[in-house]
Image (tube, grey):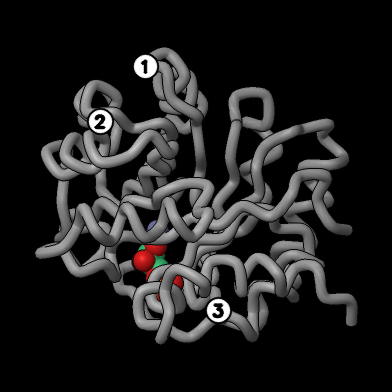
Amino acid sequence: MTSNHAPRIAPSILSADFARLADEIAMCEAGGADWIHVDVMDGQFVPNITFGAKVIETVRKLTDLPLDCHLMIVQPERYFDDFAAAGASGITIHQEVSPHLQRQLVHIREVGCRAGVALNPSTPLTGIVEVLADLDLLLVMTVNPGFGGQEFIPHSLDKIRRARRILAEGGSRATLEVDGGIARDTIGDCWRAGADTFVAGNAIFSAKDPQSEISVLRDQCAVSV
Ligand code: DX5
Ligand code: ZN
């Protein structure tokens, strides 16, 4: 069951060259990126540490594209106001560290952002049914979060199919995003399984021609198999 949306590509700046961040963002725009994906990690929920509101503010000044902020941090609600003020367009939090998920999603909408929930590969989809009314985006992680450049977990395809079914049956128009190991050989299957928004770090920034790779990835969704 594919989505009604056109495929969206969201380059993850985790894999960008930060010394040339302005050029990297300009390249994403020139290549037709739909969103910029910003990975916030705290060294607690995931082993790695990345960046916070200051970097979001910097990226905000470099582009008008929506900033899709993926918070891999504990107690994410402590930062909703700061991230929204810094220019986040969407804030996605992990269900594993969000015991009051419904209230947290409402809060994200209150600060003016798209409210998203991310699920680790081992986290079941079941809880999502209870928050569909407050959900703008469901992020099915296709690797265990923490690092760029990891291998896509094949079982994710079945989970994407089930996620699409849950959204459709619940009458939800939420975006269904996938993140981790998305590349030429995995994106088409994810699209056909029902994902509509694709985060890609390594596949874009390590490509020979990163700018054209954005369209190459999108084109894989048009291929029929
Ligand atoms: C992983 C991050 C991803 C990461 C994806 O923890 O959430 O957004 O940047 O990187 P690739 O596309 O290289 O797997
Ligand atoms: Zn991410």
First reached walking from the N terminus: tag 1 or tag 2: 2
User: Which mark, residue 183?
Assistant: 3
Residue 144: tell me if it is visible: no
Side of 11 where 34 appears, left or right: right
Quadrant including the C terminus: bottom right
Task: From the top left corner, tell me how far across and down residue 117 is, in percent.
Answer: 51, 43
Residue at the spot 20% in from the left edge and 26% down from the top edge: 82
Which residue is farthest top?
110
Task: From the top left corner, tell me how far across and down residue 90 is, in percent.
Answer: 44, 34
> Element type at marker 2?
helix
Judging depth in this view, the residue of 105 and 122 nearest the camera is 105
**Is the CB atom of the residue marked by disc 1 within 8 angstroms of ligand 2's nearest atom?**
no
Residue at the spot 61% in from the left edge and 52% down from the top edge: 8
**Is the CB atom of the residue marked by disc 3 within 8 angstroms of ligand 1's nearest atom?**
yes
Above or below, comparing residue 180 to residue 114 in the picture: below
Which corner quadrant of the image does residue 206 belong to?
A: bottom left
Residue at the spot 50% in from the left edge and 29% down from the top edge: 114
User: Which mark, residue 111?
Assistant: 1
User: Which mark, residue 83?
Assistant: 2
Task: From the top left corner, tell me how far across and down residue 112 is, in percent.
Answer: 42, 17
Task: From the top left corner, tell me how far across and down residue 40 is, in percent.
Answer: 26, 51
Evaluate if marks 1 and 2 touch, with contact meaning CB atoms under 8 Å apart: yes
> Element type at marker 1?
loop
Residue at the spot 47% in from the left edge and 32% down from the top edge: 101
Which dot, 3 or 2, sits closer to the camera? 3
